[in-house]
Amino acid sequence: MAATSPGEAPSGTATGGDGAPPEGGAESAEGGAESAEGGAESAEGGAESAEGDGDGQHGPEPAEGGAEPVVGDGDGAHGAEPADGDGAGDHGDGAAERCSRARRLAQEGDLEAAAAIFEEVVRGGAEAFRAEAALGLAVALQDLGDHEGAREADRAAMATGHPEYGPRAAYHLALLCRWEGDDAGEQAAWAAVLDAEHSGYAPAAHYGLGRLADADGRSEEASEHWRAALDSGDPLFAGAAAHDLAGRLLDAGEADDALAVAEAGLAAVEFPPLRLLLGILRLEQALRAFTQAAESGDPEVTPLAVELLARGLPLRGDDEAAAETWGIGLTHPDPVIAADIRARLRRGFPAADPAADEATEDGGFLERRDAGGRGAGGLGAEGHHAPEPRDAEWADAQQGQWPRDGSGDRPDDAVGEPAAPEVERWWEPYLESAVRGGSLPMLAGEAFGALDRMYALLAVPYAQAPATGSRRGRADDPALRGATGEALRLPSEYVWGDDLHASFRERLRRALASDTDVLPPDWPHTTTR
């Protein structure tokens, strides 16, 4: 499971004046908990959390021009206000006023002028304002593209030992290094933040150090830092830390511990990616419970457990395990359980229509077709399917079956009973296989693609045939006959084509009351015997 990453990139805007890291920290727009796709490896394993940004991290992330990690007067100016906010203590050299003017210039977009004033204060201003000016200079230089100069200015602010601007500068330096891909520089800067013992910036430092340790394979160290960030309850970093820690625990197969961490994180702060991960963790718990229930062998429990497990596994991207689960259920040694599982697999399948299929037994296939009736799969005179009445025997057979449309519960007295026998059409094994293997969309795409091509082959010559007022006149048109042959051959391109041809061959033989095939062996590719 991927971790998430801290920090907006250093930028030219300051945030509020409360000494906290900048707002907008833990971002969720590019993160999110990982869904079904890319899930856990095994049937009882964990589902992965979300694919995040480039390195899979959540949390505050450096971005071009990002947000400056220092606090100021809340107006978006560079640098930060003096502790008293009114310029007191400038020792008569105007350092406080010059810092305020530099921030206003930066806010107006005159970064070069702002940098020049900040540098003057750093070089010769009152000592009390040098840390503030150095930090403002670092931000201005970063926005001007002079990253090396920005680093030097951050280090100058840190070197003053100022209790507020020192850790702010270290925070800014860490994010600048993060943005530039300098892991060593970032780690050193975050360590400096922790050394300053500033509670407003420690959660960000723990989160950043946890991310770096995780990327370097130091999982124990990463967990310690993430737990520290989580325990802080910080609104920007506690949720992101919980998300990444829970993900790593899930990857290690410690789903229960991961769940506890996720719940603790959400108790501290609402973090949407963590909320999604919590759902995935609970899904993992459910899948483990379904597995245990399926292995019970209880005819009133096993069929439903198998279905829930098989339909739940694809949610974490494990179609192969889902297919295996269905396969094991369908071959269960208890025939009652196996039959019930097959009925559940076929949930939503259209019920068989014996009246339509039996129409071929007495020649009705040809008679109904020629009369414009529906027949066995034919069309009515207006081109619509004409429903056939279903006999009482068929209706009685349906009463004991599990509902195939999923609209209701199976009656209690029918639990464990095998599904009533029904006529299996040639295409149903393909449907069952597609449901088992998660390839139903592909099969549907093939079927609709074939239908579309066959329709196109027949529609053009049919539309262009002379309107003689006779159906036979149209059917005898050479172009239409050629198109019909091509359309009939088209299904051969698909894996199910041969079964379609075989079904028609058998239905035609029965319709003509013949004991032998009435079509050439390789029909429809040839039309003569």
Image: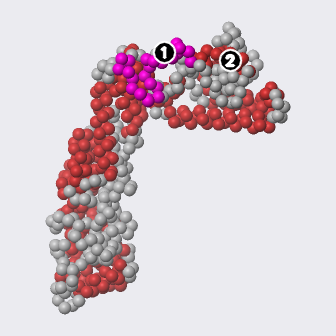
Mark 1 is on which residue type? Ala
- Sequence-wise, the earlier of marks 1 and 2 is 2
Find the magenta span and give its range. 390-415
Name above or below for residue 485 compared with residue 34. above
Residue at the extreme top of the image, as rendered: 515
Q: Are marks 1 and 2 in contact (CB under 8 Å)?
A: no
Tell me the residue that label 2 is attached to.
Answer: 365
Residue at image location 32% in from the left, 52% down from the top:
272
Residue at image location 22% in from the left, 76% down from the top:
157
Mark 1 or 2, which is nearer the eye?
1
Name above or below for residue 70 compared with residue 267. below
Horizontal and vertical percent position of residue 243:
28, 50
Say which quadrant the C terminus sits in.
top right
**Residue closer to the observer: 414 or 201:** 414
Report helix, strand or loop for mark 2.
Answer: helix
- Does the magenta-highlighted stretch encompass residue 9? no
Report helix, strand or loop for mark 1.
Answer: helix
Tell me the residue that label 1 is attached to.
Answer: 397
**Residue closer to the observer: 257 or 1:** 257
